[in-house]
Amino acid sequence: MAFGVFIHRQDSIYDDSPAERYQFPRQYLGRVQACLGDWIIYYEPRKVAGTRGYFAMARVQQVIADPAAPDMYIAVIEPGSYLDFANPVPFADAQGVIERGVLNEEGRISGRAQAAVRPLSPADFDRITSLGLDDEVPLLPRVGENTASDGFAEEQAPFVFEQDRERARFLTSRIVRDRVFRRVVLRAYDERCAITGLKLINGGGRAEVAAAHIRPVEANGPDIVNNGIALSGTVHWMFDRGLISLSDDLDILISRQANDTDGIRSFINRTGRALLPLRAHDRPHPHFLQWHREKCFKQ
């Protein structure tokens, strides 16, 4: 088993769904198979406008031939393993490239940086994930006595996991994943409820809105931003219980089984549609909306 970097972009010609599958040609079969059972990091190339850099991680569960495309293969992503980074990590910062494995012996960027699938050293994996999962309240232990979180300060060293099971336990922790997912979703929606349009901040400066999974974790819903939506408390309760849902065009649907439809309408913003994140890749995916309508919404 080994860590890897998988290059992905929104306008890819490949049939990718980062939280579920990664399609690739035969030339990368050996490299992908080396990652079987281990973690990979998704990277968006620098030439993509508004690149997210290293933006998520996931674990490869299986590698299969694509039955629909000759000479193509699919890396099946382990359900529940995908996680968007709280902070997308750039290719390089003031100290140089983050992924040291792309440097040659002279310390220059080599052709390895262009490979769509490439191996990743444990040190590079820990460095990228510690930056990607960093939060105002530290998610990872710090090296040294200074434990204050001040962004990507030079003294903030990446955490080195002593054992693989320690790393796996941390990366699959529901506490860690829920905190990161909340940050990613609330940032996408500017801490505003997508249904009511309200942006309420309590006296402690915390947004009174939750990051809801459209397809819940208990039903193998991934921790990806387009499976999330920002909802205030009562709206979240109605959404989870199928009293409201969303069409693929994000029209707000009210269940015919609701006993107070007028009351529910009073919560809905005057457009009758869910408010959208600015970035297209943050918006609810029709795949997850369909699941909610078919499995949760009370028609």
Image (tube, helix red, strand yellow):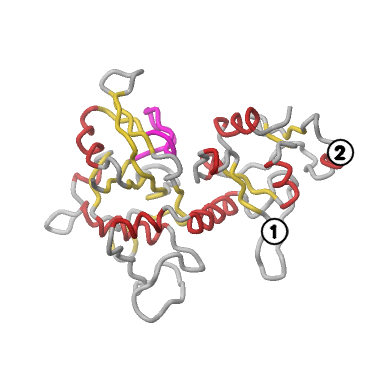
Q: CA distance from mark 1 to mark 2?
A: 24 Å
Secondary structure under the numbered disc 1 in the rendered image: loop
User: What residue is drawn where x is 51% and y is 40%?
Assistant: 281
Amino acid marked by disc 1: Glu
User: What residue is drawn where x is 74% and y is 27%?
Assistant: 299
Residue 238: percent from the left, percent from the top?
74, 42
Most foreground residue, 281 or 63: 63
Residue 90: percent from the left, percent from the top?
37, 55
Amino acid marked by disc 2: Asp
Residue 97: percent from the left, percent from the top?
28, 58
Which residue matches tag 1?
Answer: 208
Q: Is 12 within the magenta?
A: yes
Residue 166: percent from the left, percent from the top?
34, 60
Q: Main secondary structure of the magenta part?
A: loop
Q: Nearer the viewer, mark 1 or mark 2?
A: 2
- The crowd level at tag 2 (other Cα within 10 Å; few <14, some 14-19, many 20+) is few
Residue 31: name its quadrant: top left
User: What residue is drawn where x is 80% and y is 41%?
Assistant: 270
- The crowd level at tag 1 (other Cα within 10 Å; few <14, some 14-19, many 20+) is some
Most foreground residue, 78 or 188: 78
Which residue matches tag 2?
Answer: 260
Q: Which residues are magenta?
A: 7-21
**Most distant residue in the left direction:** 105
> Position of 259 compared to 58: left or right?
right
**Most distant residue in the bottom direction:** 145
Secondary structure under the numbered disc 2 in the rendered image: loop
Which numbered disc, 1 or 2, marks the residue that appears first in the sequence?
1
Q: Which mark is residue 192?
A: none
